[in-house]
Amino acid sequence: MGRGTRVWAFAHILPAAKIGEDCNICDHTFIENDVIIGNRVTIKCGVQLWDGIRLEDDVFVGPNATFTNDKLPRSGVHQQKHPITTVRAGASIGANSTILPGITIGPHAMIGAGAVVTRDVPAWAIVTGNPARIGGYIGAEPRHAVPLPVQPRPGVQPSRVQGVSVYRLPLVEDLRGYLTAAEDFPFEIKRFFLVFDVPSREVRGEHAHRECHQFLVCAHGECRVIADDGAEREEIVLDSPSIGVHIPPMVWATEYRYSPDAVLLVLASDVYKPEDYIRDYAEFCALKS
């Protein structure tokens, strides 16, 4: 147990548990042997941390939050090895929430009170409900980029996320319908792909590119894009095919809240190269620092 850690009344901590510095372990908590807790972690009253739980630095666990470590529990049947459940640095677990085993909760994520978390949670995501679903992202106020009823002048608007730009494309209407077009892209296009038939609870993206540029247009329906440069985040609503977003290299991008009819068109500056992807948010932040 690290220096400065406080343990309050009726807490039960088994001898092999590892607890960092300046933690606050409140009343009526139980911490099993194969548990690792980082620094400055707060564990409120009535929380049990079973074998396989990992809490990184600055995690907050609300009162009576429930962690599990067995997907198929039976009385008298014991696992030889428990799945690892990891709560990344700075994340908060709301009161009375339930965390299923083997899940990773991303850095700075916020789990709402009473949520039942059945799947991994991305960095900075806000999840609520049963099963828990993403309802937003911390620090990413939506920018509603829908055109006005009177066609606005086409142009480019900078995002507060470094290097990201929101494009208002020309929108032409006549008796035959609507047409929108784009040219003079900020990069040469070498590939495109379409994302569609995405269940509304699913999240796409969740990565950055080392060198590849992307240009996103929701050709039909609606979805939302979270752009993150490691310091600033912004949520951009794509609910018109006349709105495009340029995502440059070294920007973390996540797409979510797909409408059932959404078709997302992505134009890319390079062919598919697995080595160009950065899929771990902590690695991304380290490269940006």
Image (spheres, rainbow, N blue to C red):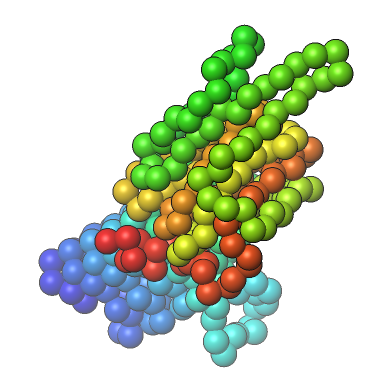
> Residue 22, percent across and down?
18, 64
Q: Residue 61 is drawn in which quadrant? A: bottom left
User: Is 242 displayed left or right of 173 in the figure?
Assistant: left
Foreground residue among 191 and 234:
191
Foreground residue among 105 and 143:
143
Quick check: 119 above or below 264?
Answer: below
> Residue 40, percent across and down?
23, 61
Residue at horizontal 53 percent and vertical 74 percent from the top: 275
Q: Residue 103 is drawn in which quadrant? A: bottom right
Quick check: 62 above or below 159?
Answer: below
> Residue 25, percent across and down?
27, 62
Q: Residue 193 is drawn in which quadrant? A: bottom right
Foreground residue among 14 and 178:
178
Quick check: 281 above or below 227?
Answer: below
- How many numbered markers are drawn? 0
Residue at horizontal 69 percent and vertical 46 percent from the top: 265
* Residue occupying the far top of the picture: 150
Residue at horizontal 59 percent and vertical 85 percent from the top: 79
- Position of the C terminus by quadrant: bottom left
- Position of the N terminus by quadrant: bottom left
Residue at horizontal 76 percent and vertical 48 percent from the top: 196
Quick check: 278 above or below 91?
Answer: below
* Residue occupying the far left of the picture: 4
Foreground residue among 259 and 56:
259
> Residue 272, percent across and down?
63, 67
Viewer can see residue 256: yes
